Image (tube, rainbow, N blue to C red):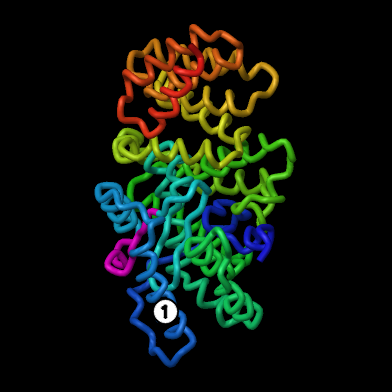
Amino acid sequence: MKRRRWLQWGCAHCAALGGLAAAQTAWEVPPRFAHPDVASDEGGLWALMDREEARLRRSPFRMRDEPLGHYLSDLACRLGASHCPDIRVYAVRTPFFNASMAPNGMMQVWSGLLLRMENEAQLAAILAHEIGHYLQRHSLERLRDAKARAAFATVMIPLGVYGLIGQLVALGGAYAFSRDQERDADRISIQLMRTAGYDTREAAKVWANLLAELKANPAGDPTQDSVLFATHPPSDERRVALQSLGSDGAGRTGENDFRAQLKPVRFDLLEEEIKRGRLDESVVLLTRLLSNEPEQPELLYFRGEARRRRAAAGDVDLAWIDFQAALRTGNAPAQTYRSVAELYRAANQGDAARAAWKNYLEAAPDAPDVGLIRQYLEESK
C-alpha cells in the first residue's frame, strides 16, 4: 500500500481539533457501555480490537516507562469520568503526531505527539477529543456504513515498514469521521476539559502550533503527506472555532507536571525526531519549545543538531551558536561535543575537532560510537 494512501487513512481525526463552531447543546456523559454480543457487528469489531490490543501490549513499539504510562492513564480517567475502567492508554514509540481510540476502549498516543505538547492541558485536549469520539460511538457508526466496512477489510493488509503500529492506526483512522462527528468530538472535548479543571484555551493552541510546524515544510502544503491533515485540510476557521469553544480561559495548564513526566524520556524522543528527517519542521518545533524553556541545554543541542544536518544557508553559524549556548550552561548533553567536532572537521580545523572529540569521550566513555571516535582520532593525527 502506498505511503500516501496510508496517510489518507492515518488518524486524521485523532488530533483534528478543528471543526466549525456549533451551538452548544446540552450533553451528558452516557452510561458505561456493555460488552456487545460477539455475534453482532460491534461485537466482532471488539473481538478483533481485543486481539490487536494484546499484540500491542507485546509490541517493541510500546513505551514501557511505567510512570509515564500511569500518568497518561490517570489523565484519561479524569477526563473519561465513569468510563475510566474501560479506557486503556498505550504510549507508542513513533515520531509522528497521532492518537486514536478504538471502540473497545483502547487508546494509543504516539511519542511524536507527546513531544509536541507544551503542558498537560494540551495533552488533555487530545485525549478528550478521542474520548469524545468513543463516547459518541462514532467508530461504530462508521463501521455500519458500507464504505467504512470496505475500508475496514482493506486496512488489515500488512503495511510494510509501518508494521503493527501503522496497521493499528489505519484501522483506527479508516472511519473518516464526518464534519458533524468532528464538531461533536470538539465540543465534548472542551466540556470534558472544563469539567476536569483544565484551561480550555490550550486546545486551539495545539492546532495552531502543529499547523505552523507543518507550514515550514519546503513543499508548502501540509495536506500532501501529513497524517493529521491528509483528509482534513488545515484552516484558520477550525482554529477560530476552537478558540470560540474554549474562550473562558479558566482552569489549569499543568505545565510543570507534564514536563516532569516527560523528562525521563524526552532526550530519546528528541533523537527520534531528528532521525525522522523533517528538519525544517524540527527546527520550528524546537524553537517553540525553547521559547517556553529558554537556555534549556537539551533543546539547544537538538536545535543545533537539526540545523547542522539541514545545512541550509546560515545554518552552520546558527548551529554553532546553539551548541555554544548549550555548553555554557554546564549541563549540555555529551553529544554536543561530538557535533562541535563535526563542525570543526567540516571546516578543516583538525586540532579543534580532536579536542572536541576528546571532550566527548571523557563525557561519554560508554557511548556506542566510542570505537568510531577513537578511529577518527587515530586517523587525524
Is 83 contained in the magenta span?
yes
Q: Nearer the viewer, residue 380 or 40?
A: 380
Q: Secondary structure at mark 1?
A: helix
Residue shown at the point (38%, 34%) measured from the top left: 368
Residue 52 at x, y = what percent? 42, 72
Is 320 contained in the magenta span?
no
Residue shown at the point (30%, 62%) measured from the top left: 81
Question: Which span of residues is magenta-colored?
Answer: 80-91
- Within 10 Å of disc 1 (Cα), the crowding (few <14, some 14-19, many 20+) is many
Residue 62 lies in what quarter of the image?
bottom left
Q: Mark 1 highlights which residue?
A: 46
Can residue 300 be seen here? The reply is: no
Residue 86 lies in what quarter of the image?
bottom left
Residue 102 at x, y = what percent? 45, 69
Q: Nearer the viewer, residue 250 or 109?
A: 109
> Across the whole image, how many numbered discs are drawn on residues?
1
Residue 161 at x, y = what percent? 55, 58
Of the 4 image quadrants, the one containing the N terminus is bottom right
Can residue 158 be seen here? The reply is: yes
Relative to 224, is 327 above or below? Answer: above
Residue shown at the point (45%, 36%) measured from the top left: 270
Relative to 261, is 22 above or below? Answer: below
Relative to 185, is 372 above or below? Answer: above
Residue shown at the point (49%, 87%) measured from the top left: 41
Q: Nearer the viewer, residue 274 or 365?
A: 365
Left or right relative to 66: residue 25: right
Residue 313 at x, y = what percent? 70, 19
Which amino acid, mark 1?
Trp
